[in-house]
Image: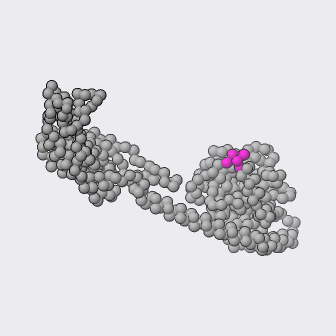
Amino acid sequence: MMRTIILQGQPYIVGLRWSPTEGLSKSAIIAEAIASQKYDRLILLDDQYGLADCGGKKGDVRALAAVIRFKEEGDLIRICMLRDEFSHQPFWWVIGLSHGMISARSDKLFDSLEEAKAFAQSLQHTLGIEDIEELTEEANTARLTNLLAALSRSERKALRLLPLHQDSHIKLLKIAGILSLIFAVCWSGSYFMEYHQQQERAEKNRLAMMQKEERIRELQSHPDRHFPRQWMKDSAPDDVLRNGIAAMLSVPLAANGWKLDSLNCSDKAMTARWEQTPFADYLHLPFAGTLDERHPQFSSSRHTMKPIPAHEGRTVESLFFQQEATRQLYAFTRKYALKLRLAFAKRAEKKVEKQTITCPWVTATWELSGISAALIADHDALANELNIPGLILKEISYSDNAWKLKGTLYAR
């Protein structure tokens, strides 16, 4: 299906059948096109040609796809809204460029935008082009007007479709001879330079595409580089537990008339919350603490923990898969009759250079409660059980005579 549109008072045809020249001579291409008896017009470019059925239309007719090829740089897939010369009804045109050539699957027409989009997505999969550009009728007219204004004289001549139907073999030879002369002239002078410029652009586009593909492979092969990796160096949970429990057990249950209300400890600091008693000394708060001005019956003190060496050797490959990590943690809680709250978050994704990168690990938060004082007293056994790959201990807390552990879990 082919249609004609009018641009700047000139007819342009869309819907041609495009093929590579593949070393065929101009005479051979013309003879093959006439023999098919399906087409009455031909456009010859340097490395491909297009065939059209103009229904015997007289006068000059130009190929709109050639305008896109001559003046647009890089690979593209574009959906354009056009209007038929005769019916004035709108239709949608899909054009694709790949490596400096008009795609043989493109230059297609559709009566609805939905059909055009479906075909463009299929073409996108075939050509491996990232984006599909969609232009309204106004935007497309403005774009084409700018492209036409940028055409050189030789490019304008090359847009014209040549008639194929001849009355005799002699006329065919004349046309072939005229075409040969035209192309010989075009290849001289300014057109010769333009051809080489097009070749250089095509080579640059090819190299750019290769670099882009290499970059995509690099992004996909190292997805962990694009997500926070502090967990790989967080202190080992057994070290955090031993260090924290030792510090927390050294805190007295009462000091300066204040009784201990709660303790919270991380690998960085321990905070104690104190509650007043009838004997509370407000001038000398426990451990040089600070008074809660909104709730003066409470005060708090803070103690900086001694540094724990960073963990070495954590890698994505060392992590359990999510199912195995979950089983390991539940087996540990069952062994010591603990209560576990475990919640995995959705696996993170991130846009990097228009590529969707999926995080190679998934994160969960966990909380262990129901820990007995006896287990805390013998916390070495508890510490050893916490060495599950990807498990991070963030907080140890004591309140209302109950102990809790909180942290994060990383799994593949």
Q: Is residue 137 magenta?
A: yes
Task: Kindly identify the residue that appears in the image at 32 percent across and 41 percent down.
Answer: 343
Task: Kindly identify the residue that appears in the image at 39 percent across and 56 percent down.
Answer: 224
Task: Kindly identify the residue that appears in the image at 70 percent across and 66 percent down.
Answer: 48
Dominant SS type (magenta): helix
From the viewer's perspective, tell me whether residue 14 is left or right of residue 314: right
Specify start and end residues of the magenta stretch as a single range. Answer: 135-140
Percent coordinates x, y for residue 79 in the rendering:
66, 50
From the viewer's perspective, tell me whether residue 107 is left or right of residue 37: left
State the image quarter where residue 70 is shown.
Answer: bottom right
State the image quarter where residue 178 is shown.
Answer: bottom right
From the viewer's perspective, tell me whether residue 349 is left or right of residue 283: right
Percent coordinates x, y for residue 122 in the rendering:
59, 53
Q: Is residue 320 magenta?
A: no
Indicate whether 297 appears above or below 353: above
Indicate whether 98 appears above or below 178: above
Task: Residue lying at the far front in this picture: please name it.
Answer: 283
